[in-house]
Amino acid sequence: MSDALESGAADAALVARALAGDDRQAFAELVRRHQGAIRNLLRRLCAGDGARADDLAQETFLRAYRRLGSFRGQARFGTWLHRVAYHAYLSEARRRPTAFPAPPAAPPDPELSRAEARHDLARAFAFLREEERAALALSYGQDLTHEEAAELLGWPLGTLKTHVARGKERLRRHLFPELEAAS
Amino acid sequence: MTEPPPLDPLEEALAHPPDLDDGAPFTRKVMDRLPPRRDPPRALLLGAGAALAACTGAALLARSSGALLAALRSAGAGALAGGEGLAALLLATVLGLTAGLVAAGELRAAGGPRPG
């Protein structure tokens, strides 16, 4: 059995235990297994704002706990959780006075800023448009296929791929201008 | 021997987000914020109470409906106005509604993950 299948089966068993007897240990295990992916996803969506991302990640797991009964097992638990996280992010972003700030202007020290952004790529997501940010955050480093990411965002696959390509181009221009110049 | 193509640093960085802490403090915070644990005995008591209230209401309703019909048949509308049939019917309706509302409110407040 592949790792993904084993992991999915383990998740399903934990969900069943959490639902059957309000088993908190089982739910805590689900949190432990998925917190890294969800926090990283939200860090990228929040352009490196770790505190905001962790608040949203907590909100994600609280929502997941309340809605655990609606998880039918058609998708993997991880995919379902990513959907909950993305919707938690959207709800919070709509409430924020400056929900989608414009990408920052040229930083005062471009070299230093570029080095920092290379080190922590999530912060460089501030350079992206909202759609590009969502497309890249869900399509990379999250164990989701492009099809799953497109379905989660409610976009056709081609639209997702377009935003991924544009986002990468924009990041490359900001972070690796030497590569851009060479190509 | 051909060299493997150089890795794209952007692709590398995108595919490998940084490792966060082990998640123990985060998990603890989430668990601390969960709603109070469901209390199975309390939920069972509430369920049994609601069922009992429903049965009682149904019995009262059936009895008072019988009385109402009997009153209508034997004495006509005049007997209905001051008769025990109408009073019993009203009482049963009020009791049934109250019991239902209280039980629904209590069950909703019991919390916990809700099966879909």
Image (cartoon, coloured by chain):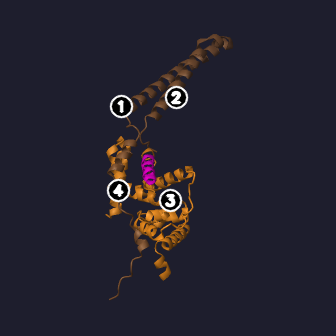
The residue indicated by pointer 4 is: A9
Task: State yes or no: discs 4 and 1 in contact (Cβ < 8 Å).
Answer: no
Q: Which chain is orange?
A: A
The residue indicated by pointer 2 is: B101
> Is residue A76 shown to the viewer in this render?
no
Q: Residue farthest to the bottom?
A: B1
Q: Nearer the viewer, residue B44 or A108?
A: A108
Q: Quadrant of the N terminus of chain B?
A: bottom left
Which residue appears at 38% of the width and 66% of the height? B16
Q: Secondary structure at mark 2?
A: helix
Task: State yes or no: discs 2 and 3 in contact (Cβ < 8 Å).
Answer: no
Query: Is A28 above or below relative to A123?
Result: above
Instruction: In the rendered structure, find residue A152 and report the number of the disc placed on it.
Output: 3
Same chain assignment for discs 4 and 1: no
Q: Secondary structure at mark 3?
A: helix
- Image-based side of A173 in relation to A26, left or right: right
Dot 4 surroundings within 10 Å: few (below 14), some, or many (20 or more)?
A: some
Foreground tag (4 vs 3) = 3
Foreground tag (1 vs 3) = 3
Dot 1 surroundings within 10 Å: few (below 14), some, or many (20 or more)?
A: few
Residue A53: quadrant of the picture: bottom left
The residue indicated by pointer 1 is: B41
x, y (%) of residue B73?
64, 15
x, y (%) of residue A51?
43, 52
